[in-house]
Structure formats: structure tokens, C-alpha cells
Image (spheres, coloured by chain):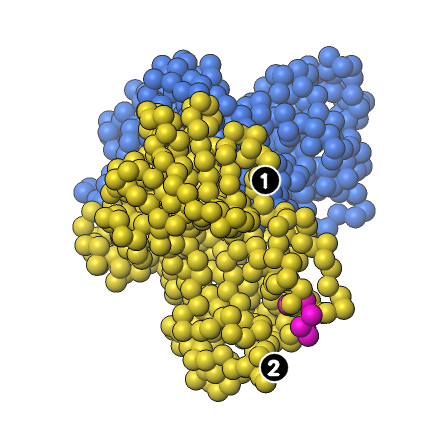
Chain colours: A blue, B yellow
Amino acid sequence: MTSEPFVVVGGDAAGLSAASKCRREAPDRDVIVFEKGRWISYAHCGQPYFIAGRVEQLTDLLSLSPEEAAERGIDLRRGHEVLSVDPDDQLVRVQDAASGRVFDQPYGDLLIGTGGRATSGPFDVSGLDGVFTLHGLDDAAAIDAYIADPDGYDRSRLGDGPVDAERVEHNRTQPAPQTAAIVGAGYVGVEMAEALADRGLNVHLFQRSSHILPPFGESVADRVEPHLESKGVSVHTAAPVNRLIGDDDGRLRAVETPLGDIDAELAIVGVGIVPNTELVQGTAIEYGPGGAIRTDEYGRTTLPNVFAAGDVATARHAVTGEDVWVPLGLTANRAGRAIGATVAGAPMPVGEVAGTAVLKAFDLECGRCGIIDTEEARAAGFDPVSVTIDAGSRSGYYPGNAKTTVTLVGDRETERLLGGSIVGADRAAIRIDTVATALEADLTVPEVERLDLAYAPPFSPVWDPILVAAKVLAGKL
Amino acid sequence: MTSEPFVVVGGDAAGLSAASKCRREAPDRDVIVFEKGRWISYAHCGQPYFIAGRVEQLTDLLSLSPEEAAERGIDLRRGHEVLSVDPDDQLVRVQDAASGRVFDQPYGDLLIGTGGRATSGPFDVSGLDGVFTLHGLDDAAAIDAYIADPDGYDRSRLGDGPVDAERVEHNRTQPAPQTAAIVGAGYVGVEMAEALADRGLNVHLFQRSSHILPPFGESVADRVEPHLESKGVSVHTAAPVNRLIGDDDGRLRAVETPLGDIDAELAIVGVGIVPNTELVQGTAIEYGPGGAIRTDEYGRTTLPNVFAAGDVATARHAVTGEDVWVPLGLTANRAGRAIGATVAGAPMPVGEVAGTAVLKAFDLECGRCGIIDTEEARAAGFDPVSVTIDAGSRSGYYPGNAKTTVTLVGDRETERLLGGSIVGADRAAIRIDTVATALEADLTVPEVERLDLAYAPPFSPVWDPILVAAKVLAGKL
């Protein structure tokens, strides 16, 4: 172990998990966390629910306070941006935003946990009032303020965090929008459709490709699309938004689409995120899919003593063993924690990702895991067979039994399970954990078919929907 | 393959699953099912919910009608009891209840799927009105009729099945009970406590040992016991019922317990079941735990061409690899189906059992799987370490987040996961499937800790309760 500190860049899930774990395992090790912003450690995934009004205060989304970080012995420095990394001398160059001072900080181990940022694609989100991406608590606060009636805005919703008050004030004073356009029907797009509908807006959801929620596959989209429509959301697929149209006051007025111009005073642009890798530009660090920093099973980059974790880093896929970039919350927390243990002298693998994701869309619950796209499976060298079945969520005679649609994909040659998706109204999402566990364990489809899963009339039929799908798939392999 | 038929004894889950699968895989094979009673293929686990009034009609619990069985080409003979098996000549001796005729039926393959029957322990359940076991639709109908007010009984609840009308009539005319005693707080006892409370009765639940629900372990009982009390059920642990006390009319009046005599006009005796093995007495067949018929991985008994499945048969435990007797619904269905495939010429293992069980107790959901009792783990040669944690069911800021208690047990030497339990009010039970899958795949605790499980604020916190428990357990191994 080195006498130089463990330096962490980024005070969010990966960074603070690593810092906390390292301090717990090696209480004598100095740990410095540089965070360029004001916020630390917040729940990205909770933002739509704050905007929906289900979460009372913005600060409810904070998972660790600066005071708690200090109690853990972490030297947390907010408002400090790491500009560059010098891997030869093991230094980072840091700028303190308050004073403007730039200084070099030596590191023994370095973790890059700089996360990602929302891309706005071809759209200029800063040019018009009413146009937002959603990636950070200041975005969430601004959107919430913009939606509110200028006279009815409740400032107590912000809590007492370091919110960008000027931006809130600017948006608060805008007239309340009636209609919203959501550009991109990925997770955030669908969650925001529900949130904005909950807030009483007319919502249009635009997706460039032929189905919403591409990572979940068609069998999920086929149920979610009409469900969104039934809740008053207008779903437009194969409908790219070409342009955002402003009025004379610099406020969004409409979006230009193949269906014509559709009036909207609010737009959420959710077309993806990109990893924040600027600080390692000019180094010999290697990149992987999505331009994320390539890491090995312990989260090590190709630079000595430099780790990366979270939305800025690749991970290993549980099915293919290949490097992938799947920027999700658990991956960041888990990898950060493992790296914290590793730099503290107790090496711990960061774990593989199965691409597990779950989503609420009004009354439907969706889940997906592994490889469910047959093209993608073929590209990974498999001979995929896919089945989709409907099964009950409970015994047929038990009240609340709901149709549950499961897709499973297996490999014809090895009979291995490759992935699956699920959608239904009753305890559907969490059942994807069975698939995630099976993928991690490399189970074959016949092995999944024989799993001893839970059965009781209020929760599951004798043959759980996953088992029904596995039975049918096993018969086709 | 033989030209003699596949003969199945018992027309319930195991037997009819086997018969159906065999006919599907080998449509030319003759399949005869002998069922000694009038009912076939019904949902045992649904009976408490019929009594509770959540299931409208008794016949809603039927999963396959005689007509449907005939459509599948199954020669189903109800009212036919198989008296004995002659393994040397490959014959069964059968008695037709209607005519009294006894005849020999040759078999090519034989499946014993005779199930189990409720034991009444030291109690004479037939001696007093108001005393019941619950193992079959006639029991369910009788209990339901007994509870009803004589003037208010709704006969349409029976549906149009072959119910024992005389028994229903006898119970229907009894005065409605006010207070019920449930003897034995296993699954059926707890489910019946809820059902009878739903029907407005004062319910006393008696358990001989120090906690209810012994298979679920103390951490589950510690939450379910006060929850039952909060719902008005009086829970008496370390309180064996010594005697059932009748009045002069031959009707239950009270139960004698260490707490004194407690008035009750209804008693449900749920002290266990025993396998129905009478028909193989006198043969050289081998028995396993619980007096059930020992079977191998394909459901074969020690007699040639004789299989056994369901509540009458042993199965192999996923953790210990030992023969166990775990009479549950999925096990029966799954083993029956596999044996049907095997006798049709496409051998299929019956699968292991992990002892997965889930249970609803009013607003709480409980699950258990594998080995959670440390004494039992030690007896199986493990060096068990057990942890119990509380975690949220959702993100802390999301409405509906509920405390979820997880116990996990691991082996210190191999780090293998041995079992687990869960209890909570929000999507708790179904999460035990993660444990079941992990056990089947022989995952270690650190491997479970790194599973890529589902995370979205409405369904799960970043660290699923199972992951939280695995983290803590991994730190103790």
C-alpha cells in the first residue's frame, strides 16, 4: 500500500461508495473526493418521481450528506473540478471553483467516477425556455418549477439543499405549460410521460424507432404502448422530432415532427447519456463501448493504479463475457464498493452486469435482463431461439390475477439461457431477478424449467410465468 | 417401450400432469388413471381462500375437468381404488367402488401419485361436530357450510362438482360458530387463521413449539406473530392443545390447553400430513424420510417400472443432495410432468427441491427456501453462519417503502449459500425466487452479493434486500 491518498473524482454513487468502503476497511487510509458540483450522492432514478409529486422534497433524493461523508472520515471537496490526470507522476490537476486556484494532488490510487451527462442530440436545450434534459437535481428542480403555476409554486419542495436558486426562479415565473413533448421513449422518457401526466399535462411521447423502450424488446412495448395511450399519453413511434420551435419570447412553442408541428410548451429531451471522460484525454487510457473507460474485473483501467466505475466505465457482461457499457445505478454502487475494498487491500471483483432493468409505466411493471434481441444474440455468436408467453401472476381463481407476458431467449447449441423480459400489472418486474440470477449462474433453459420457485395462490400460480416460458422454450431448443 | 399401458394411481397434480404429458409426447400410448375419489386435479392451496370467501365457488379450484382429461386421451376412472401392486407380474389390483368389483390391471409403467392425507394427531376429528382437518374439497365445503349461518348459507358457492352433499347438509344446519381454535400454526394453520378472521370469527391459533411457522424460522415468526395479533388473532405459542371437549350434543365446546380451557365451536386440526403408501405395503419398495416412497432423479422407485411423485414421494434436496420429503404443489406438478415425458421415451429429470415456500399472512408476505435452521445445517455437515437484516422494499423516498426482513445462511467453509427467508409487506414473498435460483445453481454468498438484481424506486432500493443480506453475510464468512 502507498502512503499517498486514495483520490476519488466524482461524489456520486460510485465515488462515495468507494470512499466509504475504503475508509471502513482501511481506517488509516486518506481518502479525498473531488466533486465539481454542489450536490453529492443523489438518486438519479428518483427524479421523475419528484417531478411527479410522489416524492415530497428534492432533498429526499439525497442518500448521503456532506456531514455524513465527513463522519466517515472522507475528505470531501465540493466545487473542485479535476481537469486532468498525469499517470506518470500519479497526480491529478484540480481547480477550486470558488477561488479559481489550480493545484496538483498526488494519488496512490485513483478512481474516476465522473459519471455521464445527458446528451441533447441535435437539439439546443439551452436556447429555449421550456426545453430540458433530466440529469441532475438542478434539472429536476427547474422542470418542477417550470410546470408549476407561477402563483402556486411551493418553494418548500426544494428542501434545504444547494439548489441553483436563480435557475429555479427563472423557470418558476414562466406560465404553466399545458402540453409536453418527450423526445425519446427510453426509461426516462416513459417515466417522465407518467410524471407529467400525473401533473395534469397533455403528453406526447416521440420515439424515432418503431417501438418505445428498445432495450425491453417488442413484447414489452406491445403492452406498454396501448397502456400509455389508455392513460392519456399520445405515443408516436417511428416519429423523430426534427426541430424544436420557439416563439418570439424565446420559449418553446411546438415540436416539428413527421406528423406535423405539435404544440408544446415543455420538452424533455431524453436521447441518451455520454460518459464524462474529458479529464483523461491525452492519457494512454483505453476506451470501450460507448466511449466509456475500459475496466477489468476489479475495475482497473489500463493506467496503473487508476480505477473507473459507474456511468463512465465499462463492465463485463454476464452472458457474453464482453465489455459493455450499461450505465445503471446498482452497477455504479457495486463497482464503487468493490474498488473501495480493493484499494484498501481486500481485493473484491466488481461483478458482472446482466443488463437488468426494471421500469414502472403507470400500472404496468416491466423488466428485462441479458440478451433479448435475437440480432444482438447472433452478433455475440449464439444461435438464439425466442419465445413469448402469457401466464397468470397468481392462481387463476385468486382475485388480482393479472396477465404476465414473458419473453425468454435461449441458445440452441448450448441450451443456455441468454436473457428475458417481463411485463404485467402484478408483481411482474421483480420476477426478472430470477432471470438475472440464472444468467449469472450460466443456467440452461432446462435447468430454469426445473427451478423450485415460489408458489402460493396470492403471489404466483403453480407454474410461475418464468417457468411457463422456460417450459415452452425448452421444447423449442 | 411396452405395449401395456401407463397406469397412474391418483388423479391429482402429479398423476394428471404425468398422464397429460405422456399422451402429448406419445399419443399412441394407453394411459389409465385410477382415482379412488370423485374429485380430480384441484388446487389444495386454494382451499383457505375459498373458505375465506375470496374464491367464489368451490369448483373454481378445479384445474382439469374429467371431460378435459378425456379430450387428452386419458382413460380416467374415478371411484376406482388401487388396493395393491404386484411388481413381479406388473399388475395392480383395483376395486370399483360403484360395483364392488375387483380386477387386475397390467401395467407397462406405473406411477404412484396417491398423495398424502391430513393426520389428526391424537385427536378424533370424526367424533365431534365442528372439528375438521383440511385436505380436500369435501373438507373445504364442510367447513364453509359449518361456518355459515344456517339461514344464510349460499349453496351456489359449491358450484356443480361432485361434492359430498350429505356432509355439507349436516354441517350447514349447525349453529354458526363464534370462536375457532386452530391446532397447529404451520402454513395451513396461518392461512386458516386469516380465512376465519375474514369470516368474522374470533380465532385462537395454537402452536406446540415456541414459534409459529417453524419451517420459516424465527425471524419470520417474530414479525408474523404480532401481525396476526394486530389483526385480532390470538396467537398461543408453546401451547399444545391437549384435548377437544364436546358438549352433550356431540359438538365441540372448548379446547383444553395449558392456558386453561378455551371455548371454541370450530377447530381446524392442522398438525401435518402423511403419505398414502398403503397400496405398496408388502412389496419390497424402499421408503425415505417421512415414510414417503424413495425416488431417484427420474422419479423411479426401487421397484422396476414403478415411479412415484407428489406428496407420496421423496425428492432430492438442491442444497444437501439428500432425499427429502417436501410435499408441495409445484414439486408434484413438475415431477409428474417429467415422469410423463420419461415413460413416453423422452427422459426428463424431475428436478430437485429447494424447499421453497411462500405464504400470505394478512398484509405480510413470507418466503423461505433451502436450509435456514442452523441445527439442520450442522446435521447436514455444514458450518453455518446466519444473518438477519432489515432493508427497504423500495427506495426510501418512494411511497410504499416497507421494512423487509431477510435471513440468509451460508457455509463458512465453502462460502456456499444454504438458504434464506424473507418477510415484509411489499413484494416480499416473490423475492425468495432469487434465493431458490441461487441455491439450485450452487452460488456462493459473494456471488449472490454481486448479482445484478432489479433496481427502480417503485420496486426495489439500489441494494435489493437479498443483496443487503448477502453483503452482511459475506462479511461474516
User: In the rendered image, which quarter contains the C terminus of chain A?
Assistant: top left
- The residue indicated by pointer 2 is B249
Magenta-drawn stretch contains B21: no
Specify the subunit that label 1 lies on. Answer: B
- Residue at the spot 18% in from the left edge and 50% down from the top edge: B413
Query: In terms of depth relative to the viewer, which is nearer, A47 or B447?
Result: B447
- Residue A139 in sight from this viewpoint: no
Q: Is residue A459 above or below residue A441?
A: below
Residue B326: % across, % down: 36, 52
In this rendering, the label closer to the viewer, 2 or 1? 2
Query: In terms of depth relative to the viewer, which is nearer, B368 or A11?
Result: B368
- Lower position in the chain sequence, tag 2 or tag 1: 1
Q: Which region of the structure is painted magenta?
A: B171-176
Q: Is residue B281 above or below residue B125?
A: above
- Residue at the spot 63% in from the left edge and 25% down from the top edge: A222
Q: Is residue B330 above or below residue B155?
A: above
- Label 1 sits on a secondary structure element that is loop
Quarter of image, res B433: top left
- Label 2 sits on a secondary structure element that is loop
- Residue B344 in sight from this viewpoint: yes
Residue type at the position of mark 2: Asp
- Residue at the spot 72% in from the left edge and 69% down from the top edge: B150
Residue A358: % across, % down: 53, 36
Specify the subunit that label 2 lies on. Answer: B
- The residue indicated by pointer 1 is B65
Query: In terms of depth relative to the viewer, which is nearer, B105 or B158?
Result: B105
User: In the rendered image, which quarter contains the N terminus of chain A?
Assistant: top left
Q: Is residue A160 above or below residue B337?
A: below
- Position of residue A372 in the picture relative to residue B314 (left or right): right
Magenta-drawn stretch contains B173: yes
